[in-house]
Amino acid sequence: MKGIRRLAEYLDISIGTVSRALNGKPDVNGETRRRVLAAAEELGYVANQSGRSLRQGETKVIGLMIESSKETVENADNFFLGVTSGLQSVFARHNLDLIMLPCPSDEDPHEYLKRMVARRIVDAMIISDTQRIDRRIDFLSRAKIPFVALGRSLSASSFPWIDLDFEGVAAHAVERLIALGHRRIAITAPSSEANLGYLFIESYRRALERHNIAFDPSLVIRVRSSEHGGYQAAHELLLLEERPTAVILIYELMAIGLYRRLMESGVMPGRDLAVIGFRDAPRARFLQPSLSCFRISLYDLGVELGQMLLATMPAYQEFYPGDGRNIVWPLELMPGESDAFEVGADEKEFEPERLSFGDRTVEF
Amino acid sequence: MKGIRRLAEYLDISIGTVSRALNGKPDVNGETRRRVLAAAEELGYVANQSGRSLRQGETKVIGLMIESSKETVENADNFFLGVTSGLQSVFARHNLDLIMLPCPSDEDPHEYLKRMVARRIVDAMIISDTQRIDRRIDFLSRAKIPFVALGRSLSASSFPWIDLDFEGVAAHAVERLIALGHRRIAITAPSSEANLGYLFIESYRRALERHNIAFDPSLVIRVRSSEHGGYQAAHELLLLEERPTAVILIYELMAIGLYRRLMESGVMPGRDLAVIGFRDAPRARFLQPSLSCFRISLYDLGVELGQMLLATMPAYQEFYPGDGRNIVWPLELMPGESDAFEVGADEKEFEPERLSFGDRTVEF
DNA sequence: CCTACATTCGTAAACGTTTACGGAATGCGT
DNA sequence: ACGCATTCCGTAAACGTTTACGAATGTAGG
């Protein structure tokens, strides 16, 4: 005898009552409920999820789909784990569990998603790495599976998403650099179909034009968003006939390779070339020079994302009003040393903003 | 009408036959099978996992439990995604799916594991971040849940695990540094209960003693394995009355902070202080100076881990013989610039090993 | 004492599969 | 024409839950 039957037999009551007691249903005597809970604890009973899901038609599990492609492995360092914490803090309130679904690199993300959803392993989905045109979105919409996307996308119908404010970052970075006297500003972008690159470059272009600076396509460096990409980017910058005085990185990780390549040619980042990075990471402030970059709270992003998802699920809509919102997530500039100089100014006169560290442990 | 019934009705055959056709059972006519498969494709039918699991008593899902603690978020950048690829390549052959189970930071890992296992969401488990004494291991053993551990642990009974060769790395690093003329070698270690620190230090101590160098506890720096920990470690090294000429890092990420702190005091890593890191990452070779570190193929590690797990599962033992093995995973030294000098030698005479990069895209 | 209602619990049906079992149809050898 | 093996398929039970329904009991009001 297994499962709930064992418990019922042990207590000499019916399985229906046991189930009701465990699930907090009202029509069960207080004393009975106490006995059931005690026995469940004693026998270590936990309801079999398959039986429960089958009966209820829901699994109480939310899936976070991530891609385990080589590129993601290199780039997205802990981005997802950071977001996961925020998501879980929301889901925990409703006894929802979060699982991460890593799409194998040799499988089509769309097929993988279909498989997971059709098997009813999860009730709802959070998808990431959305492409400009992403078949997963139409599929989920049509299949009426609740979902939110981390990253906007072009789609016929509207759908809930949160995306980082690439446009704001690019514009802010350009404005800042122009204020520091820069006129020739390079920018990096991925060559992939991910949506972010397009918006990033567009915003950069518009910001330049607001200041009557002509857009120069040769200043847009298309490389992978990795350390090696940064190395390559620096290499290309150094080859330009008219060298830029500043560069905006779409991913801060690139700074490591960029710094190296620059130094190999005797060009000092933060003195000879200003650098601003997108997204922060602990390493940014420990680089030499420390990297000016845009901060983001992954935890808060996760919380918002979780709430947005629950708002699309009928069972939870009462708690989270406001279906189908879209959020462009703002980022905050963390000034570092990598752009702390004015073009043409005498460096001696300029006091760069410095970070200071005590000897004691500092909690970040 | 839903599910397999719909399919059966559509084809006007019984659900039993449909099920057998889909599952490749022998007693079904070839033509019938063809029709069923075609109809399933047409109607987009995929078996409901809850029903299937309930009947079969297995889920065909393997769980990889990871901790989403702050420390893990900072440190374990993509370690798991890397391993995941290898795992999936093994599991895919048996139609097993891998899901990642991130334990919330505010929940006891043991309780979380119990919950997931009891709910029968997964058939087997891969656990990581094992502590020196880890209750999860006894629990899984007693509950007879197939599992493997990424990281060894003290346990009454033996269990299958793979662990990185901390001892080999520490010994190798010490030998190498001594060969380069170093006598005063510092080492970093975590203060946590994770098993790795203990082995690392012990092996370091024994290697020193083999060369008749006294073990100096003040050279063991206990900090967090993050960039900031590296910064702190450098700070402490600089305060020592008799400064070491080399340092071994238990995690290469620390090099970034270490480099920074050293440079702030005018100490050049790779010239004034030798540095060797544990575990590689793309960034290691792009640091200035590039970091000597120990390489590991996460993919291969995942493959081995996956096979080891299947070997413990009755249904798959025929394919993967050799139950209950333990593997100490070897690492290979990737020489960089950070320790490429001999103590006391004239630097001009010494040609450091350099990495070269072409202008073209180099695939790592 | 009868009725109405609330409380508590047992019964049994569903949820969507898989699979043991047996029956029908067919082929084959005699 | 018969027996027997083989091939194919339908029937129904089972997996472990939840839950609609109704029965049993107690309680209060008339």
Image: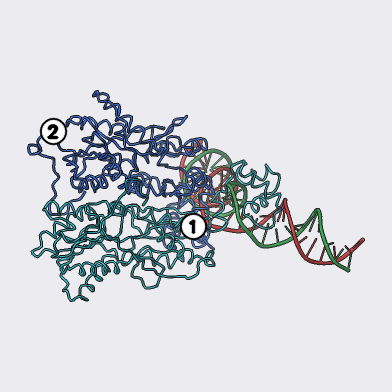
Chain colours: A blue, B cyan, C green, D red
In this figure, which residue is indicated by the disc labeled 1?
A: B91
In this figure, which residue is indicated by the disc labeled 2?
A: A344
The foreground one among A21 and A312 is A312
Quick one: quadrant of the N terminus of chain B? top right
Q: Secondary structure at mark 1?
A: helix
* Mark 1 touches mark 2? (CB < 8 Å): no
Mark 2 is surrounded, within 10 Å at the Cα level, by few (under 14), some (14 to 19) or many (20 or more) other residues, namely few
The foreground one among B350 and B338 is B350
Q: Chain of mark 2?
A: A
Do the residues at discs 1 and 2 belong to one chain? no
Q: Chain of mark 1?
A: B
On the image, the x and y values in percent for residue B206 come to 23, 74
Mark 1 is surrounded, within 10 Å at the Cα level, by few (under 14), some (14 to 19) or many (20 or more) other residues, namely many
Disc ID at residue B8: none
* A57 lies left or right of B229: right
Q: Secondary structure at mark 2?
A: loop
Q: What amino acid type should be assigned to the residue bearing mark 2? A: Gly
* B238 lies left or right of B254: left
Q: Cα distance, mark 1 to mark 2?
A: 59 Å
The foreground one among B175 and B350 is B350
On the image, the x and y values in percent for residue B193 come to 27, 64
Please, is residue B101 above or below residue B173 in the view? above
